[in-house]
């Protein structure tokens, strides 16, 4: 945590994707926000958000600027991370349908399938019961969303659809969700993430 009880400094990986929406939610929750586009910008962070976007593009850009290994090292060192949609894909240890040569950052013991619900036209919103967050239900927006096909022994499911399919999981300081809480006014996942930051 930042010294002197100050607001935590949260980085948002800003290579591609919905950065602004996450920055707004974090500001509402009194966190300081900085944008991360190169390895040196990971220094001094209390936590990191991996936003939605196009996972293959984010991975390619991260590799180009030399961020993949520093991100892996930060996660291995215990940095709290929230990944949404494409960010969940980046956190997954395994991809069921990765593009040729697609890497993940890893750390979350799950297997994820990209675009599991179909194309953009198949996007939808639904209410999710998330016991760890309590009532009311979470309003979740699924936009070309991934799905957690398997939760390994290291991780635990946090939210499931009505048919039992897993759409959020956590493991230690890592929290990954398949949907976009930041676009529906839902702040409790970010608050849960910031709780991890504070307890670290």
Image (cartoon, rainbow, N blue to C red):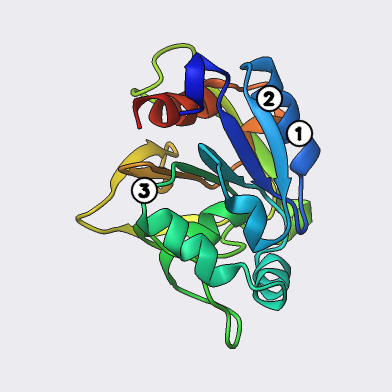
Residue 145 makes an appearance in the image: no
**Do the CB atoms of the residues marked 2 and 1 lie less than 8 Å apart?**
yes
Q: Residue furthest front?
A: 4
Q: Nearer the viewer, residue 153 or 11?
A: 11
Could you tell me residue 133's position as x and y percent?
A: 41, 20
Q: CA distance from mark 3 to mark 1?
A: 25 Å
Q: CA distance from mark 2 to mark 1?
A: 7 Å
Depicted 102 relative to depicted 194: above or below: below
Depicted 105 relative to depicted 129: above or below: below
Depicted 145 relative to depicted 7: above or below: below
**Do the CB atoms of the residues marked 3 and 2 lie less than 8 Å apart?**
no
| Circle 2 residue | 25
What element does badge 2 sit on?
Answer: helix
| Circle 3 residue | 78
Q: Please state the total of marks drawn on the protein image.
A: 3
| Circle 1 residue | 21
């Amino acid at each position: 945590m930042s010294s002197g009880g100050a607001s935590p400094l949260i980085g948002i990986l800003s290579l591609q994707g919905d950065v602004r929406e996450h920055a707004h939610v974090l500001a509402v929750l009194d966190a300081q926000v900085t944008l991360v586009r190169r390895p040196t910008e990971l220094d001094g962070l209390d936590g990191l958000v991996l936003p939605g976007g196009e996972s293959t593009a984010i991975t390619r850009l991260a590799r180009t600027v030399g961020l993949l290994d520093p991100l892996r090292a930060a996660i291995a060192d215990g940095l709290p991370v929230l990944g949404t949609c494409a960010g969940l894909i980046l956190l997954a240890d395994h991809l069921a349908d990765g593009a040729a040569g697609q890497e993940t950052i890893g750390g979350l013991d799950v297997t994820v399938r990209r675009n599991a619900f179909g194309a953009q036209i198949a996007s939808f919103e639904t209410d999710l019961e998330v016991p760890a967050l309590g009532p009311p239900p979470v309003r979740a927006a699924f936009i070309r969303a991934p799905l957690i096909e398997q939760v390994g022994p290291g991780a635990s499911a946090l939210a499931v659809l009505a048919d039992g399919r897993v759409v959020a999981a956590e493991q230690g300081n890592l929290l990954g969700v398949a949907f976009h809480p930041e676009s529906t006014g839902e702040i409790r996942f970010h608050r849960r993430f910031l709780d991890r930051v504070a307890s670290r």
